[in-house]
Amino acid sequence: MKYKIISVVGARPQFIKLAPIYKEFEKYKDIRHIVLHTGQHYDFLMSDVFFKNFNLPKPDINLNIGSGSHHIQTGEMIKRIGTKLERIKPDIVVIYGDTNTTLAGAIASVKLKIPIAHIEAGLRSFIKYMPEEINRVVADRLSDLLFVPSKNAIVNLAKEGISNVIANSDGFKRGNPPYVIECGDLMYDILKIVLKNVKDDERDILGKYNLERRGFALATVHRAENTDNEENLENILGALDEISEDLKVILPLHPRTSGILRKSGRLKKFRNITIINPLSYNEMLILEKNSRAIFTDSGGVQKEAFWLKVPCITMRDKTEWVETVESGFNILAGADRKKIISAFKKTEKRFEPDSDKTGVYGKGDASVRIAKFIRDFLRWR
Ligand code: UD1
Ligand code: UDP
């Protein structure tokens, strides 16, 4: 094998983003693709389930870092990723999104002068102390290939002085890294693939959870700004519980949130909310597709609602995925009980988003473009 590429992943959305890229790298006979899992997420339903879901082999390396305060978790990751990189000497490291794993992958690589490709670059919430904002700002600054999902991400990077946008591999010849490459959103690739494959399972999965098409809403809550603030979490759960008497709310609960509720004795029975364990990707997609509305503070789920054309109420004050809001698919309601309920009522009365806008994150071929660009970059260097 000519080229060694390491993907550094560790959290749920990164296993999902890895899936289409993994399959693309496999197509190149001169690439050896090594998957390094930091162990940031480790429960079966937060990690292994996705490797099974997408028929991915077990990660080549699992550092089993586990949970901890941000500086300790990230520090430990930098140290141990660095040790592996020193030994393996990859030609490039691929990092995904904006988690502590992303940040650690970037710092460990740059310290060893290994080029970095950042997938999902250029996103900004402009909230300085939001953990994910810190991670993506630093990761972008250190990366050589910045794969952006949208035009808006190009603008964000240009404002920070990262402005060498290239349309194809010839661009490598015309200037030095970092390169900004618009490629669409990788999560659209996997959504399209899985949607095709799960058609026959829909009825069974809805039956398993006792749900009917459009007869329920789906919710997810895990962001620090919501879970670590007692009032915000109360407001969100209160709103979901009183949305409507005849609309069940299914809440596959992130372990962060269930841990917090359990500790404070608030993991009680709700009137309208049914709490279930985190779902596999296939199940999640089926529930998203068939729900009447989606309530979320997740980044990935906002986009999936957008592609599936399901009304989305985002329980945050700001979103990085501004296009979903601009097109009318997504309403920002913060952690405000009244706003969440009224946003939902609005979608029930009238939901006529601008369907022409669903192409803003590409066509679902990001993984093909990204893998090719990375290989071309390695050949050119
Ligand atoms: C992380 C990311 C966030 C991303 C989310 C995806 C950071 C700073 N945050 O948040 O951007 O949206 O992943 O889901 O990287 N826990 C378990 N089992 C697990 C994993 C976590 O019980 O398998 C619990 C632990 O109590 C842990 C808490 O969840 O302390 C938070 O986990 P952590 O990975 O630190 O952050 P997330 O909230 O998952
Ligand atoms: N997801 C899943 N099962 C769940 C909840 C979410 O498969 O129980 C998927 C979801 O469909 C999306 C991704 O996980 O593809 C989003 O991850 P998460 O919300 O954990 O992180 P974020 O996108 O906010 O970083």
Image (cartoon, rainbow, N blue to C red):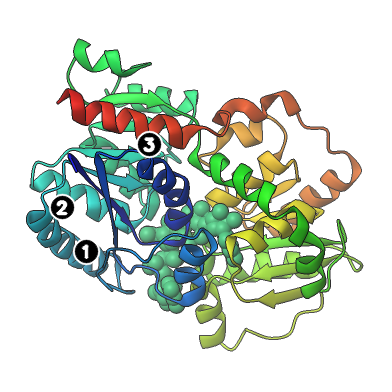
Q: How crowded is the residue under tag 3: few (<14 C-alpha within 10 Å), some, or many (20+)?
A: many
Question: Where the N terminus falls, by quadrant?
Answer: top left
Q: Which one is nearer the viewer's eye here, 151 or 28?
A: 28
Residue with the mark numbered 3:
121
Where is 54 relative to 115, above or below? below
Compared with 186, 255 (above or below) is: below
The mark nearer the N terminus, 2 or 1, is 1
Kindly identify the amino acid type of the residue bearing the numbered disc 3.
Ala
How far apart are labels 3 and 2 at the CA level? 18 Å
The numbered dot on residue 108 is 2
First-in-chain label (3 vs 2): 2
- Residue 85 horizontal/vertical position (percent): 13, 54
Q: Is residue 364 left or right of residue 51?
A: right
Q: Residue at x 66, y 66 (%)?
A: 235
Q: Residue 249: name its quadrant.
A: bottom right
Amino acid tagged 1:
Met
Q: Which residue is mark 1?
A: 77
